[in-house]
Amino acid sequence: MALLDRTTEKVLAQIDPSGFKQSGAFNLRHNGIALCHGDSEHIKIKKKTDVSGIDVYIDGETNGEEVHIPVVLVASGLNDKVYNDFHIAPGANVVIIAGCGIHNSGCDESRHDGIHAFHVGKGANVRYEEKHYGEGEGTGTNVLNPVTKIIMDEDSVFTLETAQIRGVDSTKRETFAELGSGAKLIMTERLMTHDTQTADSVMEVYLNGERSSAQIISRSVAKNDSRQIFYPSAIGNTDCTAHIQCDAILMDTAQVRAIPAIDAKHVDAAIVHEAAIGRINDEQLLKLRSLGMSEEEAETVIIEAFLN
């Protein structure tokens, strides 16, 4: 069992709130190397031999088990790139908890590029949670560029929950999914930027199988002088349904652009999109202020409720 320093434990608490434990199936990547990992009866983790990363094999007998694969960077100036592939057998039911946290106390950029590919078997049910977080007393920037690729077989279900908590100076997020017949994708992105941070998010969902469906929700808060751009899109190639929803709260002198796209290539493809950007509701703010909260406390309560 690897001994973890206090800084690493603090960052892990932010990106893995359910509690990272060195038991069952897990893999902790720390400053660019696999610090510790373990297997369970139904889940095996193997180190790649051609590139940096792991292959996670989840068999069809897996039922409700969790896999924890966090990444922590505590060294300033580190550029970490990793390729992780998840092979989920037909009928498996699994929860995968990931996320990356950076503690940067230096003057150089710390960066993590995580490329994750999911191969989801027929009838499998996968929940994937990924949180991003940055902190540190230094002047160096924290950069996170996640890429997520999801290939879904017939009648599979994939729930994707991503959240950027705070402290990430720049992020370029790319998510791609291909859905087979009867497959169901539920994708929720929650993101907050502050100061001069920037966030770009591209989400492309291809509904290729009959009766496939997708729900894409993006909720964000932009503070100070930060900037956000969202490009969610759903491409219906057959009889399918999809819904895209983008909601954002704008504060101070921040900027948000939401450019949802729907592309129906079949007469029975039913695809809808919504987008709304606005300020904090004045009535909600006034009500909380009347309960004795300061303006800052009231804003925090409203933002947390909106993102959650």
Image: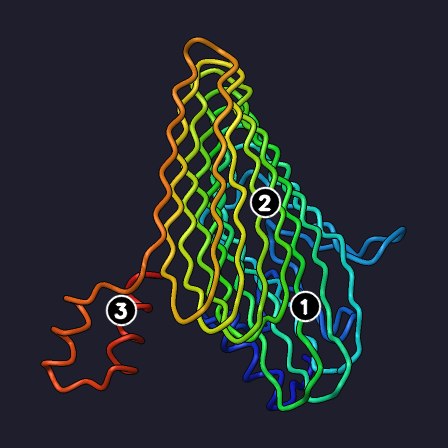
Label 2: state its secondary structure: strand
* In the rendered image, the vertical position of residue 28 relative to residue 256, given as above or below: below
> In terms of sequence position, does the residue under pointer 1 or pointer 3 come before the other?
1
x 58%, y 69%: residue: 197
Which residue is label 2 attached to?
202
In this picture, residue 154 sits left or right of residue 291: right
Distance from label 2 to label 1 (Cα)? 16 Å
Distance from label 1 to label 3 (Cα)? 27 Å
Q: Position of residue 130 (x, y in %)?
A: 53, 59
Rendered image: mark on residue 143: 1
Rendered image: mark on residue 302: 3
The residue under label 2 is which amino acid type?
Val
x 57%, y 36%: residue: 204
The residue under label 3 is which amino acid type?
Ile
Label 3: state its secondary structure: helix
The extreme front residue here reads 253
Q: Assess whether mark 1 and mark 2 are in contact (beta carbons under 8 angstroms).
A: no
Quarter of the image for residue 121 reads: top right
Q: Which one is nearer the viewer's eye here, 57 or 223?
A: 223
The residue under label 1 is which amino acid type?
Val
Q: Quick one: label 2, few (<14), some, or many (20+) residues within 10 Å? A: some
x 10%, y 81%: residue: 290
> In terms of sequence position, does the residue under pointer 3 or pointer 2 come before the other?
2
Image quadrant holding the N terminus, namely bottom right
Q: Quick one: label 1, few (<14), some, or many (20+) residues within 10 Å? A: many
Q: Quick one: label 3, few (<14), some, or many (20+) residues within 10 Å? A: some
Q: Position of residue 137 (x, y in %)?
A: 62, 91
Quarter of the image for residue 308 reads: bottom left
The extreme right residue here reads 50
Distance from label 3 to label 2 (Cα)? 26 Å
* In the rendered image, the vertical position of residue 70 relative to residue 55, given as above or below: below
In this picture, residue 120 sits left or right of residue 33: left
